[in-house]
Structures are given as structure tokens and as C-alpha cells.
Image (tube, rainbow, N blue to C red):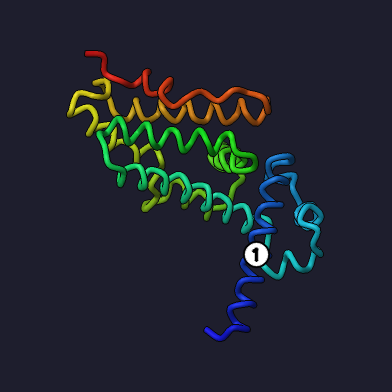
Amino acid sequence: MPRQDQQNKQIRDERRAQILQAALRVFARRGMVAAKISDIAKEAELSHGLVYHYFKSKEEIFMTLVQKALDSSLDVISYANEQVGTPLEKLCWMTEKIMKSIDNGEEILLFLIMIQASTSDIVSEEVKEILTGEHAVSPVMATIPLIVEGQKVGEIKQGDPVQLAVTYYAFIQGLAINKIQWEQCPIPEANLIMNIFKEIP
């Protein structure tokens, strides 16, 4: 790729990232329904028209953030599975990464985006397809094989692995909501959460 094209691509990528970060803050404060493109443009310190140059609507921006949040969640699960160690150690590694993201500034707002997308009945069909479509993979379902593996070797509590995965993510979402509502909320060590799921000899 010629140097000029590389520079132009870098500028486009940076501008898209700038818009998405601004939109993340706006959607977190106002919700997808109340948010406007003009709010996002103001937050990004860009012109209204420039935002439309990169995204055709606030719905497209929201959908992009939902996909980003989902990809981020699935990536950490994938990386956990690649770690050396037992299933419980892999789950603990994953939990540490998630706890850091909850405790790390604007990354936590992606949790809020996912909650909005999952609970609102006015999201677009494209967003619904991402979350519940035929080819959709949720973090809960992606974590189940790791739980099953841990149960087989006697590290993780026996029981319905779906219920265990749902319970795990209920903890995660609850912590994320608490952190959003209470900035000084202490985030627990991963081992504290792991103790709930660990099989006691």
C-alpha cells in the first residue's frame, strides 16, 4: 500500500475510533433512544457532517459498539483457552482480565452497551441478529466448554454448566453495574469469584 494511502487509512481509523469512543460515552449517559448524532458529534468535537461521513446513523454506531463489546468478550474467552494450565486456572486468568476491564475507565461502558442491547425492545434487527441470531455465540455459551472441562477433572463444582455460566456472568454484570453507579466500588480479586465455583474436596 502506498504511503499516502496508509496515512489516509490511519486517519480514517483514528477518526472512526474517536467517534466510537464519543458515542460510547453518549450512549452510556443518555441511552440509545435519547442519544442523537449531534450529541455524538459534540462529544467527539467533530462536525455533524463528518460523523455522517463515517456512519450513516446512530443505529449503525450502536451496532458497531455492540459488535465490539461482543468481540472483546469472546476474545478474552479464546485467549483464556490458549493459556497453559488447568481449566480453573484458565477461568481465573479470564476473570482477572475481565476484572481489570471493569476497573479500567471507559472499557466498562461496553458492558453497559451490551446490557442496553440485550434489554431494549427497540434495537435494530441487525443488533438482535448479532446477539441472538442463528450464528450468534454468546459469552455464556462460549464459557460452558471450559466449565465442563473443569467439572470433568474435579476442579469446578458439579451441576448444570449452563446455570454455572449464567451465574458467573451475573456476577460480572453486577460488578460492572456497581462500578458504573459507584466509581469507587472496590473490584474483588478473581480468586474470590473462583472460590464460589471451585469444587471443595
Indicate the position of residue 107 as horizontal and vertical percent values: 59, 43
155 relative to 25 in the view: left or right: left
Foreground of the two, 7 or 75: 7
Indicate the position of residue 85 as horizontal and vertical percent values: 26, 37
Residue located 35% across and 33% down the image: 91
Label 1 Cα neighbours within 10 Å, binned few <14 / some 14-19 / many ≥20 = few
Q: Is residue 55 visible?
A: no
81 relative to 138 in the view: left or right: left
Foreground of the two, 166 or 147: 147
Foreground of the two, 193 or 172: 193
Q: Quadrant of residue 84?
A: top left
In which quadrant will I find the C terminus? Answer: top left
Residue located 61% across and 71% down the image: 10
Which residue is labeled 1 in the image?
Answer: 14
Foreground of the two, 133 or 79: 79
Indicate the position of residue 95 as horizontal and vertical percent values: 43, 33
SS for callout 1: helix
Is 5 above or below relative to 152?
below
Q: Quadrant of residue 182?
A: top right
Q: Quadrant of residue 144?
A: top left
* Residue positioned most to the top: 201
Residue type pointed to by label 1: Glu
95 relative to 141 in the view: left or right: right
